[in-house]
Image (cartoon, rainbow, N blue to C red):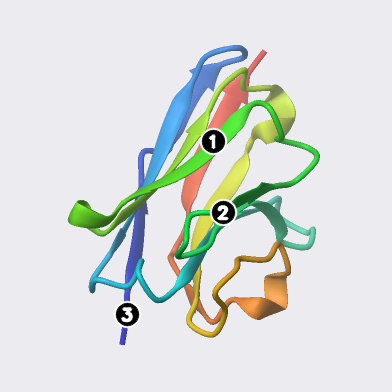
Amino acid sequence: QVQLVESGGGSVQAGESLTLSCAASKYIFSRYSMAWFRQVPGKEREAVACIGHIGNPLYSDAVKGRFTVSQDRAKNTLYLQMNSRQPEDTTIYYCAADSTRVFCTLRLGDYNIWGQGTQVTVSS
């Protein structure tokens, strides 16, 4: 069973940058699509960005141009670089993996492996 562990969350000021990491317990990036989601308590989990195992990233409209998803296969680690942070980016961020598709999607139901989440707070 693959395990995903997020790290890098914390508190930043609006406009500052922050990079989240997601370490996978096994080498999966050549076979799995990966994604970042976020969820405000009481609301549905929403997609932020994803990257397929051939490296084609997708971004939600809310973060396009500000966030960058990448992966380091040698370290089994997925990253989310977040620039120009805004207070509405405050929430819990989750890493997810999809073992069934070549190209990634931004659909919540397509992901079957999840990390525990990391809290990000942006102050104005």
Q: Nearer the viewer, residue 52 or 7?
A: 52
Task: Give the foreground label among 1 and 2.
Answer: 2
Image position, residue 69 (x, y; %) = 50, 43
Q: Earlier in the sequence, mark 1 or mark 2?
A: 2
The residue tagged 3 is 2
Q: Compared to 9, does 4 lie above or below?
A: below
What residue is drawn where x is 42% and y is 33%? Answer: 19
Query: Residue 120 bears which disc, if any?
Result: none
Q: Residue 2 lies in what quarter of the image?
A: bottom left
Q: Residue furthest front?
A: 54
What residue is drawn where x is 39% and y is 76%? Answer: 31
Q: Earlier in the sequence, mark 3 or mark 2?
A: 3
The reply to whether callout 1 and callout 3 are in contact (CB within 8 Å) is no
Image position, residue 59 (x, y; %) = 69, 45
Query: Is 116 displayed left or right of 58 in the figure?
Result: left
* Mark 3 residue crowding within 10 angstroms, few (<14) / some (14–19) / many (20+): few
Query: Residue 68 bears which disc, if any?
Result: 1
Name the quadrant of the N terminus: bottom left
SS at mark 3 in the image: loop
Name the quadrant of the C terminus: top right
Q: Compared to 16, does 41 lie above or below?
A: below
Q: Nearer the viewer, residue 44 or 80?
A: 80
SS at mark 2 in the image: loop
* Mark 1 residue crowding within 10 angstroms, few (<14) / some (14–19) / many (20+): some
Task: Give the foreground label among 3 and 2.
Answer: 2
Inter-mark Cα distance, 3 to 2: 22 Å
Kind of residue sitting beneath label 1: Thr
Image position, residue 33 (x, y; %) = 50, 68
Q: Earlier in the sequence, mark 1 or mark 3?
A: 3
The residue tagged 2 is 56
Kind of residue sitting beneath label 2: Asn
Q: Compared to 33, does 43 lie above or below?
A: above
